[in-house]
Amino acid sequence: MKEEQTKKMQQWAKIIAKAWADEDFKAKLIVDPASVLRAEGVEVSEGMTLKVVENTEAITHLVLPVIPGGGKEEKLESRISGTSAILPTHNPAPPEDWPFDD
């Protein structure tokens, strides 16, 4: 499963880099993310609604994930104890040698 997650992260990193480099691509990604992601080789389930938002210098979007385990309190307690998240405070610039395939 780790290999699959790594592949998805690499796909998403390439899509982000392409959106940073190409305003038309970014506009299409924001308007119709499912079609753009499919065209980039990302599996998108039928019926899945996707929303792409862009952070700015003044706005950072935070996403609340689906509650694991159906929201059962005892399961949540065990999952969140000792867990922390590192949240970005700015929009990082891509490295100069960012690997990007057309």
Image (tube, grey):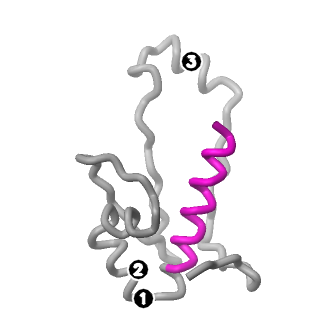
Question: Would you identify the image quadrant in which residue 98 lies?
Answer: bottom right
In the figure, is residue 70 to the left or right of 22? Answer: left
With respect to residue 2, does 6 lie above or below? Answer: below
Residue highlighted by disc 3: 77
> How many C-alpha atoms fall within 10 Å of the one at disc 3: few (<14), some, or many (≥20)?
few
Mark 3 vs mark 2: in front: 2
Q: Is residue 79 left or right of residue 50?
A: right
Side of 81 relative to 42 (left or right)? right
Please state the extent of the stretch shown in magenta in the rendering.
1-18
**Where is residue 63 drawn, in percent x and y?**
45, 50
User: CA gap, disc 2 to disc 1?
Assistant: 5 Å
88 w.r.t. 5: above or below? below
- Where is residue 26? Give x, y as percent: 41, 80
The three-letter amino acid code for the residue at tag 3 is Glu
Q: Cβ–Cβ below 8 Å for labels 2 and 1? A: yes
Quarter containing the N terminus: top right
To which residue does mark 2 refer?
Answer: 26
**Residue 45 location (% of width, % of height):** 33, 47
Q: Which of the 4 image quarters holds residue 93?
A: bottom right
Q: Which of marks 3 and 2 is nearer the N terminus?
A: 2
Label 1 crowd bin: few (<14), some (14–19), many (20+), radius 10 Å: few
Circle on res. 23: 1
Q: Which of marks 3 and 1 is in front?
A: 1
Q: What residue type is labelled 1?
A: Glu
- 88 and 45: which is toward the camera: 45
Q: Is residue 81 left or right of residue 65?
A: right
